Image (cartoon, rainbow, N blue to C red):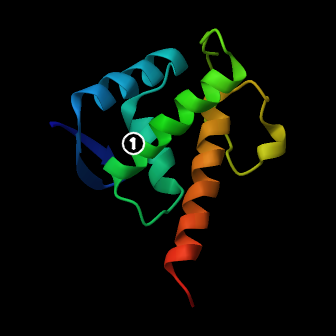
């Protein structure tokens, strides 16, 4: 297991993942031209009950699955934005934007898991 530190707002986190997941996360960061801090902030903003490590594992799986479904040749699209994206309006997302669609899918998956875990 390898560890990395990240600061989200005023909170510091220590994220621990297997080396292959770090390689996959790094691939996403490179392809999407985003920082680790940005990705963690967006995952954390979705307010799931998941740890940041679990969120990163699940998001990585969703990202590469979406990418493979959108591009069977695995030609990953790149997002270059001048402003931070607004993930709260899924209708504004381009259908071939793997990062945005993956964050939306992650949010929906986490929301579904939260409802199953809380039988209130």
Residue in view at x 41 percent, y 28 percent: 35
Would you say residue 81 is visible in this rendering? no
Asked if residue 97 is positioned above or below residue 45 in the image, the reply reads above
Q: Is residue 47 left or right of residue 76?
A: left
- Near mark 1 (Cα within 10 A), the count class, few <14, some 14-19 or many ≥20, is some
Question: Is 70 drawn above or below residue 4 in the view shown?
Answer: above
Q: Camera-side residue: 100 or 84?
A: 100
Kindly indicate the quadrant of the structure image that contains residue 46: bottom right
Residue 93 left/right relative to 52: right
Residue 33 appears in the figure: yes
Residue 27's place in the image compared with 49, above or below, is above
Q: Residue 37: x and y, percent?
A: 38, 37
The total number of labels drawn is 1
Looking at the image, which residue sits at the far bottom? 120
- Residue at left offset 54%, top offset 59%: 110
Q: Which quarter of the rendered picture does the N terminus lie within?
A: top left
Residue 53's spot in the image, x, y percent? 32, 48
Quarter residue 21 falls in = top left
Where residue 70 appears, as percent x and y from the top left, is 71, 22
Residue 29 in the image: x percent, y percent?
44, 23
The residue located at (51%, 46%) in the rendering is: 42
Please tell me which residue is depicted at 68% across the width and 16% down the height of the picture.
71
> Which type of secondary structure does the marked residue at label 1 adopt?
helix
* Residue that numbered label 1 is attached to: 57
Of residues 74 and 6, the one drawn nearer to the viewer in this rendering: 74
């Amino acid at each position: 297991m390898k560890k990395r530190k990240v600061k989200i707002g005023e909170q510091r986190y220590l994220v621990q993942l297997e080396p292959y997941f770090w390689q996959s996360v790094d691939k996403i960061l490179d392809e999407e031209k985003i920082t680790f801090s940005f990705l963690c902030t967006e995952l954390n903003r979705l307010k799931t009950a998941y740890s940041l490590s679990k969120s990163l594992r699940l998001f990585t799986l969703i990202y590469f699955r979406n990418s493979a479904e959108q591009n069977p040749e695995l030609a990953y699209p790149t997002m270059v934005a001048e402003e931070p994206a607004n993930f709260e309006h899924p209708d504004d997302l381009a259908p071939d934007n793997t990062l945005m669609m993956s964050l939306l899918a992650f949010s929906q998956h986490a929301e579904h898991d939260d409802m199953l875990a809380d039988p209130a």
